[in-house]
Amino acid sequence: MFSYTTDTNSEDCNIIKPINKKNVKQAILGIRPCDSASFGIVEKNFDTEEYKDPFWINSYKATTFIGLACDNPDSTCFCTTANSGPFDEKGLDILLITSGDSFIGKILTEKGEEAAKIAGWTTEAPANSVSAIEKQKKEAESKISSSISTDKIKNKDTLELYNASFWEEEAFACINCGTCAYVCPTCWCFDIQDEISDKKGIRMRNWDSCMFPLFTLHGSGHNPRDLKYQRVRQRFMHKLKYYQDKYKSGIQCVGCGRCIRLCPVNIDIRSICDIMNS
Amino acid sequence: MVEYISKIQKISKKILQDGKVDIIIGFSSGSLPMASRPSFIKSPEDADKLIFDGNCGINLANYLAGRKEKIGIIAKGCDSRNIAQLIVENKIKREQLFIIGVPCFKMIDKRKISLLFEDEITQVTEVGDKVIVKGKAKEKTFNREDLLQANCITCTHHNPVIYDELAGELIKEPDQKDGYEDVKKIEAMSSDKRWSHFSEMLSACIRCYACRDACPLCYCPTCFVDEAAPQWVGKSADNQIDVKTFHILRAFHCAGRCTDCGACERACPMSIKVREFTRKLNSDAMRHYEWEAGLTTDKRPLLDNFRVNDYQDFIK
């Protein structure tokens, strides 16, 4: 984000300056619909009435999202009950749909139109495309075999859920690595770090994870989430309860299933959600 | 290995009923194929939840350090070695433990299966020396031998080294000792080549620390990468020097202590072969000191035990 020098001979010594990021126009090609839907969630943190994060917003604005619809979702995908779906168009500028050996592109925004023009994607789609895509979408949605329910969580008392007795047992297997957070498209927590080499320094931002004790360690030495189960609870309460309460727009999850597939000890957000919702 | 299940359940039920232990640490069925879940049970009725199969590669010793209650624990060869290690390092007391030993038929590498099976895997069943893998549209049978975790292939301690009761007959250990052929290959590289080999290997690291967190040796209250005052290591995954510092230093912290259980590689979401570092140290411990970690609770750990005839050619 920023750079500085600690060289006392320089007149800019210790003055922090924004790194001039040009935000060259870029495109993400082949992003899955669940992943692009996640930007709508992440945006709620980085682009608010009160605070606007220029680094995130500028980079987001400079990006064109060209998605690829999912014809064969995994058994761990539960996008249709988590803000998204295999043909979801949220956050996308173009949605590509596989059609034999080619793709049909559904242009969704002006940005998408411009990108298609630049890419030379000018061939008209066959006349029956609209109904064919609709059929393909229904088929893909019917292949989604897992789902979650969060309706009851919404109306539950926050402290009652927070103090529930199941957390310790559910958290037992967790080894407190950050895999779930680092592969999650909706996790937005970050850390700010200064790194100095010789006299040149940069202030940068990198992902952080609520699984790490250091994440909440206070300067005083006190840590409000000192224990493993407290950190596990935070992850699921944030995604499934606090977010619902604060933003009134569903849960902070798009059902991509990555955390389920990659957790080394099989902690499954679907089963935790079931327990929280019961 | 699945034959052990009824025995594990029976022993667990009994020791819980008799009040010998307060909890049992074992595995229960996971929500996905090849994902057995580390779990604890407290009541004898729940003993039926305990399972054991070729997907129990996570090292359960990792859940012991600092616990105060009386614990029953299911232990393969490597888990038992790490338990012995934890006892020697005063992280748990032998009297607290009832170790249910499981002579290990080697663990399955889920990534190997996924690479050999194009479809999404929906079911994996072990039948003797075969593994039947089912997908949505097809089924394939593999030889178990072709699907093993890398560390299990070179393992020479399948039988638990300490236990209170066994869940199965002890098995014959391989005649051949680990030759560390993989380590020799890396040692033979020029230092430049080795550096670029490790640089490439670690470039995928996302700094999630799953390797460290799955390791039963890593119980430091605050890991050196988490120290904030002063902060020894930078946080960015872009800074490859810091990424290397983490991995190489972590490996050195495991010198003379690592049992090559493979939990680190199993946990890594990026499939990084982090054992390449610890294997080198294990190989050195063997070559210079004839030392293998966790084989007994009677000896002090390698690095806090000086003997006058110790190898010391490295002191120049």
Image (tube, rainbow, N blue to C red):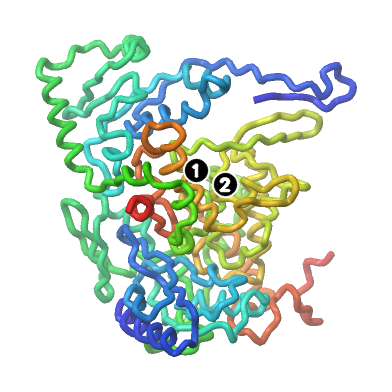
Of residue B292 and residue A228, the one placed in the foreground of this image is: A228
Q: Residues within 10 Å of mark 2 (few under 14, many from 20)?
A: many
Question: The residue marked by circle 2 belongs to what chain?
Answer: B
Residue A208 position within the rendered picture, expressed as x and y whole percent measured from the top left? 57, 41
What distance separates the C-alpha of mark 1 from that of mark 2?
9 Å
Q: Which residue is mark 2?
A: B207
Which quadrant: the N terminus of chain B?
bottom left
Mark 1–mark 2 CB contact (< 8 Å): yes
At a point 34% along the width and 29% down the height, the residue shown is A30
Q: Residue at x 35, y 41 (%)?
A: A256
Q: Give the secondary structure at mark 2.
A: loop
The residue lying at 57 percent from left, 19 percent from top is A54
Q: Quadrant of the rendered structure where residue B274 is?
A: bottom right
In this view of the protein, which residue sits in the foreground, B169 or B115? B169
Q: What's the residue type where badge 2 is placed?
A: Arg
User: Which amino acid does the dot numbered 1 rest on?
Assistant: Tyr
Give the number of callouts. 2
